Amino acid sequence: MVQGPQSRYGSAMAALGGAAVVYGGSQAQPGAVREYDLWDTWVWNASVWTQAADLSPPLGRHRHAMATRFARGRANGSARIVV
């Protein structure tokens, strides 16, 4: 069972509704010479982590920015995350 995202640095986070969304970052394997970029998305709802199912995630990246983009003029008030 996965408890939450693996340790990382340089990830981005944005608020979406009552949750926080984390994307990407970088991680080095123990004993590795270089780090590698992550391309997973996690959602924290103030009690548990859930890994989001990305149908077509952007390439792995770190030290990037992320923001919430709310759809204007939509009755359901839907929102998206933009990386």
Image: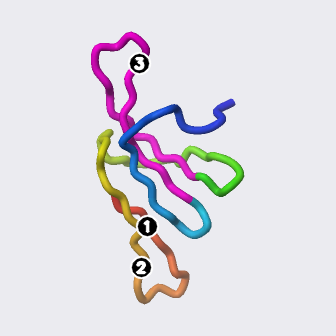
Write the residue at 64% across / 33% down: 2
- Rounded to the nearest whole Å, what is the CA distance between mark 3 and mark 2? 39 Å
What is the number of the mark on residue 80?
1
Type of amino acid at the residue the image marks with label 2: Ala
Magenta segment boundaries in residue numbering = 20-43
**Is residue 22 part of the magenta span, yes or no?**
yes
Local crowd size for mark 3, using a 10 Å CA cut-off: few (<14), some (14–19), many (≥20): few
Callouts 2 and 1 close, C-beta under 8 Å: yes
Q: Which residue is mark 2?
A: 71
Tell me where residue 23 appears, x and y as whole percent: 43, 48
* Quadrant where the image shows the C terminus: bottom left
Write the residue at 44% across / 35% down: 8
Callouts 1 and 3 close, C-beta under 8 Å: no
Above or below, comparing residue 74 to residue 35 in the picture? below
Q: Nearer the viewer, residue 41 or 18?
A: 18
Mark 3 element type: loop
- Rounded to the nearest whole Å, what is the CA distance between mark 1 and mark 3? 32 Å
Type of amino acid at the residue the image marks with label 1: Arg
**Is residue 81 part of the magenta span, yes or no?**
no
Q: Which residue is mark 3?
A: 29
Going from N to C along the chain, the mark reached first, 1 or 3, is: 3
Local crowd size for mark 1, using a 10 Å CA cut-off: few (<14), some (14–19), many (≥20): few
Going from N to C along the chain, the mark reached first, 2 or 1, is: 2
